[in-house]
Image (cartoon, rainbow, N blue to C red):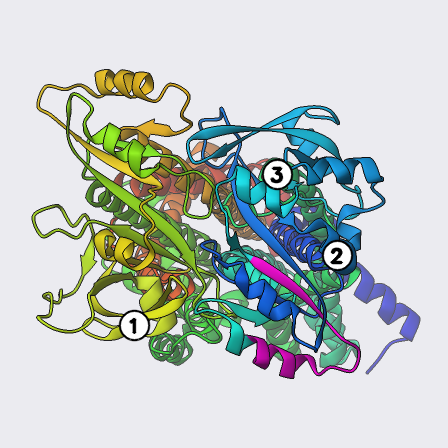
Amino acid sequence: MSVLPAGAALLARATVLGALADNRARALLAVAGIALGVALGVAVHVINRSAVNEFARAAATVSGSADLTVRAGRAGFDESVYARIARLPEVAAASPALELDVRIAGRRDSRDTIRLLAPDLLRTLQVQPALLGAQGIEPLLELLAGDAVLLSPAAAQWLGLGIGGTLELQAGTDRVSLRVAGLLPADGYRQRLAVMDIAGAQWRLQRLGVIHRIDVRARPGVDVAGLAQRLSALLPAGAYATRPDAEAQQAAGLSRSYRINLDMLALVALFTGAFLVFSMQAVTVLKRRPQLALLRVLGMSRRTLVAALLGEAALIGALGAALGVALGWFAAAEGLKRLGGDLGAGYFEGVVAAPQLEPALLAAFFAVGVAIALAGAWLPAREAAAAPPAVALKPGDQEAALSRLHRRWPGLLLFGAAALLVQLPALDGLPVAGYLAIACMLLGAVALLPVFVAAALRPLPEPRAPFAQLALMQLRGAPAHATVSVAAIVVSFSLMVSMLIMIASFRQSLGDWLATVLPADLYLRAGLPNQAGFFSAEEQQRIAHLPGVARIEAVRGQSLLLAPNLPPVTLIARSLDPAGPLALPLIGSRVEPPARGPPLAYVSEAFRDLYGANTGGRIELPVAGRRVPFTVAGIWRDYVRQSGAVLIDRAYYVELTGDRLANEVWLWLDPGAGAARVEAALRGLLPNAQFEMREPAALRALSLAAFDRTFAITYALEAVAVLIGLFGVSVSFSAQVLARRRDFGMLRHVGMTRAQIGAMLGVEGAALGGLGVGCGLALGAVVSLVLIHVINRQSFHWSMDLHVPWLPLAAVAAVLVVASTLTAVWSGRQALGDDAVQAVKEDW
């Protein structure tokens, strides 16, 4: 039997879509859950995409019309290579350049640097004319004098300098003063950049005879790939001829793992948002079960009913996704302004980027938000459509409708799949299988929740208070309803637990690592390995003979390019004297020095994973323009250099290169010699020198502060996880309490007071909160192991020791249980406010 189409449509609109108006608060919570997840994903992706695009744009400006760029690490290579390349008949023009990060003199933070590019100005006009823009002849002549620079507008604004101002830079430990002769075009380069002539830069920055890059433009008709092969034969070890966009690809690859991990966390927030929709739809569909069955009796097909219920979820998803896209765009703009394009992680220092509008990207996140809402509503909609109308019209059928949730095999199957996925390697350097394993664990845990809830409630002793007895009877009699309430808590709390354990483990491991790698009493730093600061050999000797200094150790760092498609690795040269401290957190065994064969080198975990180096094996490093073999003596844990690091003996490094400079000097003090007194003596010994001086405790504090800054967005995601969990509790409890108004009316008739019913609901909320917290703790502990030993290892090549933050976990668990209790009581206020006779009149 069927009704008129207009009448059926009116009835469907009133029964199905009208439910949104009757459940505005719960619908708004579901919308908020979807919006938070979409906003996080949009913000993270837009920020990183904007930074990567800006970096690529800047790299294209620097390379200009070049077909190939010859690059090496920051150690550079001999400038004679340029002459050999420029004379090739296939080369139309070649532009050599010095390129390095230079510290701003007078600033204590070694990260306050500016990128200095020093090309041959005459060659630059042939290959990179857009870099200099429409400069007049006078600024260019000033640059040729060797004591002037051009600043990008971003650098000028950051430094507060204009034309005619003085830029103070650090070279070695000296202060170099340069005049600002002009500004680079605003639309050509938006990073913090200073440009000067190559001859002046080599002289002023003490880099005579060294260059870092050569931009090559081929003659028309020349095969660029063939030219790259020919150039490779002329290059020293560690230098490569690549496409101009290779540097931007390397930078994007270096930050890719960090960005994708944040994207995954944002998708996790969306995943929990799906459970909000599931909880709301499951309970409200059960509440409307007789009305939906009536629609079936009146002629509505199953397919139409499913489409109507999914349309309801799609509307929630669309509202949440639209709100999330807008919030995410605003958060991206603020994040770029306050944290920069690296979200505090340090991948794009000096990049000034604005959020770039990409309609396709925003549309994709909008579609994901809608799809997540549809996924959450799919099972309730199918169950409502599959129920026989005659059975669904009878009261008391709600629990039977959720009987499918009691099946164990889907959960066991999902956990089995997770166990297999965690064994798989990374896919293109990304822990795809690890994230799929976590998704399987979350879904498997939700599938097994009815079993867990029933098993946990069965052995509980009977309470004495009548309201507590009724609460326990309700939970035991409707375990599927309890499962719907607990699901959101389990998902959100388990993810928060896993992140808390992972971050605490990382932070504790970082602290232990710092205690090992900082053995000295005082540390001096003139500059990082890719910067222009260093201590000369004479300064090192003067420091060593300072009163109160027992001994020193000079450390030299260089940046080496081992593969054209991978970021540079850091070569660390310091004493490996067996009598001194190794100061390395070694992993596994250590090789003894061989009587014959290559000297020893210690490699970091990232180096081992990226280049296949194992203890006892051999590697070759490009040192002083040639490949030098080393024996891998051991693998060490390094939390600073994601692209890999190698430690060799400094005496052998000096023998190979003749380089006696040092980026850092470690000081061991005489007994009784205070660090403050030695620092004062150092300032008197080197009054005009530019360097940092810190004690181990200060370095530890700075490192942990940088760690917290890097994980700031992760802390925000944890807060969102807790918020979504509370949303889920509110959605499910409020819907279930309103569905039980008749039950409360009967209880009022038999003599229970409102306070007793409120206490009963509080016991239910506390019990469900405790069940969710207990299951979430167990599941979160397992997920944390996947994060620590699979995702973190495959993403960043870092291992860490497990550390459980018991006190924060206990505090958050207590807050959730209390919040669940209060939410249950608050959700019952509306039902308790109805007149008892009015509530049970449907049963008369």
List the residue tagged with mark 3.
Answer: 834
**Marks 2/3: CA distance?**
78 Å
Q: Are marks 2 and 1 in contact (CB under 8 Å)?
A: no
- Asked if the magenta segment contains residue 300, the reply would be no
Q: Residues within 10 Å of mark 1 (few under 14, many from 20)?
A: some
Q: Are marks 2 and 3 in contact (CB under 8 Å)?
A: no
The residue range painted magenta reads 213-231
* Residue type, numbered disc 2: Gln
Q: Is residue 414 left or right of residue 145?
A: left
Which picture quadrant has residue 753? top left
Q: Secondary structure at mark 2?
A: loop
Residue occupying image coordinates x 41% and y 36%? 756
Viewer-side label of 3, 1: 1
* Residue type, numbered disc 3: Asp
- 412 vs 91, nearest the viewer: 91
Q: Earlier in the sequence, mark 2 or mark 1?
A: 2
**Residue 547 locus on image (x, y percent):** 16, 21
* The N terminus lies in quadrant: bottom right
- The answer to whether any part of residue 285 appears in the image is yes
**Residue 584 locus on image (x, y percent):** 20, 52
Residue 128 got which mark? 2
**Residue 576 locus on image (x, y percent):** 17, 53
Residue occupying image coordinates x 53% and y 62%? 80
List the residue tagged with mark 1.
Answer: 619
Q: Residues within 10 Å of mark 3 (few under 14, many from 20)?
A: some
The vertical placement of 246 against 831, above or below, is below
Which picture quadrant has residue 521? top left
Q: Earlier in the sequence, mark 2 or mark 3?
A: 2
Q: Is residue 193 left or right of residue 821?
A: right
Q: Secondary structure at mark 1?
A: strand
Residue occupying image coordinates x 40% and y 42%? 707
